[in-house]
């Protein structure tokens, strides 16, 4: 269990699904999660799952 300030919360890292993406603009391949994935190299939103 982690503690931040006066609030306790539980964080189960096994439930997080990280997926592999490729940027169609610069060709960078990277791992990401979430609904709005952005290339960490060129900041483009033109990415696809690989």
Image (cartoon, rainbow, N blue to C red):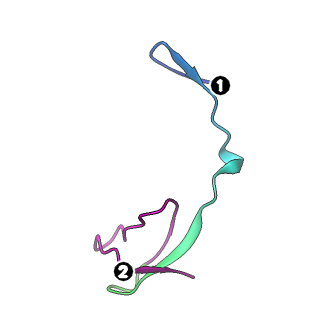
Which residue corresponds to the image point at 37% horizontal and 68% vertical from the top-left?
A: 38
Q: Nearer the viewer, residue 40 or 8?
A: 8
Query: What is the span of residues highlighted in magenta in the rendered image?
Result: 29-50
Report which residue position mark 2 lands on.
Answer: 46
On residue 1, the disc is: 1
Q: Are marks 2 and 1 in contact (CB under 8 Å)?
A: no
Q: Residue furthest top?
A: 6
| Residue 31 in magenta stretch | yes
On residue 17, the disc is: none
In the shown orientation, is residue 33 left or right of residue 10? left
Q: Local crowd at mark 1 within 10 Å, few (<14), some, or many (≥20)? A: few
Question: How far, Cα to Cα, is label 2 from label 1?
Answer: 37 Å
Q: Position of residue 35 (x, y in %)?
A: 47, 62
In the shown orientation, is residue 22 left or right of residue 9? left
Which residue corresponds to the image point at 64% horizontal and 29% vertical from the top-left?
A: 10
Q: Is residue 28 above or below residue 2?
A: below
């Amino acid at each position: 269990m982690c503690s931040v300030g006066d609030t306790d919360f539980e964080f189960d890292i096994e439930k997080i699904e990280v997926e592999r993406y490729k940027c169609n603009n610069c060709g960078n391949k990277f791992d990401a999660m979430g609904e709005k994935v952005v290339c960490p190299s060129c900041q483009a939103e033109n990415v696809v799952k690989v």
